[in-house]
Each structure stands twice: as structure tokens, then as C-alpha cells.
Amino acid sequence: MRFEESIDFGGDAEEVWMKASAVRDIPMYWHGTRSLEVVSEEGNVTHAKVVFGFGGSGEADISKDTEQKLLTIDYISGPFTGRQTVRVGQGRITAVWDIKFRGAYRLAEKGSEGHLRSGTVHALERLAGITPTA
């Protein structure tokens, strides 16, 4: 499953990037992530254990490119594998998901895209300081 969501914002891009790149705060903005435990940090890469709001857990490598204002999450195990990126630009924040569900979670994949898209928009709004839409 691959999709992209973006929103425009009127705030400071640096402030939004600081929120988006705060790895330990991911569950605060991305409600589909129930918890995130940092296992190790090396340079700009953080290895973490992730527990998802819909059930299941896995591991991810999270890298930050401050110059490009790009956060990359590589999900390496769990209900799905693949990559999510979050890029902050001047007045715009964009998330791209490119993931594949695994095991029994594949049965719910088709019905999950709308939910993931909605959750992504809400997370981007929270990061940008916009009250999430209903």
C-alpha cells in the first residue's frame, strides 16, 4: 500500500520540524503508535520498539535528515514492513507511506487504507498546530 497526504500550514517550518523529528514524541502526534521505546541511537538513526494502537508490535529504524527536514521510519518487523517519510517544507508537511501488511494483518489491508489516511492527516495537523478535523 502506497499513499501520500499533505497539509498546508501557516506556522514556522522549523518549529514543525522540531516536533516531527522528536522521535520519543511520535506517539503524541501519531495516535496509531501506542508507544515507542528507544533501544539505541547511533548518529542520526534511532532503533526503536513500537507498539501499535490497532494491535501488534514491531521494530523500526528512524532516521533524521535535518538539512532536508526529512524523517524516515523503516518498519523492519511487525504487522507491516516498509517505509514512512515525513517532510517539512515552507508551509507544507507531507507524509508518504509505502508498506506491506504481513501475516493475518494482510486480511484487513484493503479496509485499512482509509483509516491510515485519516490518521495521517490528523497527525500532520497536530504536528502543524492545527486542530484536527473530525
Image (tube, grey):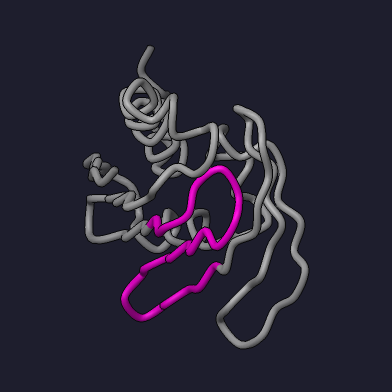
**Residue 131, position in %: x, y?**
42, 24
Residue occupying the point 33% across, 47% down: 11
Residue in front for this viewpoint, 68 or 56: 56
When asked about the image quadrant of residue 119, the answer is top left
When asked about the image quadrant of residue 44, the answer is bottom right
**Residue 64, position in %: x, y?**
48, 73
Residue occupying the point 63% across, 42% down: 27
The outermost residue toward the front is 103
Instruction: Please indicate whether residue 98 sits to the left or right of residue 42 in the image.
Output: left
Question: Which is the main secondary structure of the residues drawn in magenta?
Answer: strand
The C terminus sits in image quarter: top left
Q: How many marks?
A: 0
Q: Is residue 51 above or below residue 72?
A: above
Residue in front for this viewpoint, 41 or 82: 82
Residue occupying the point 61% across, 40% down: 33
Residue occupying the point 43% across, 66% down: 72
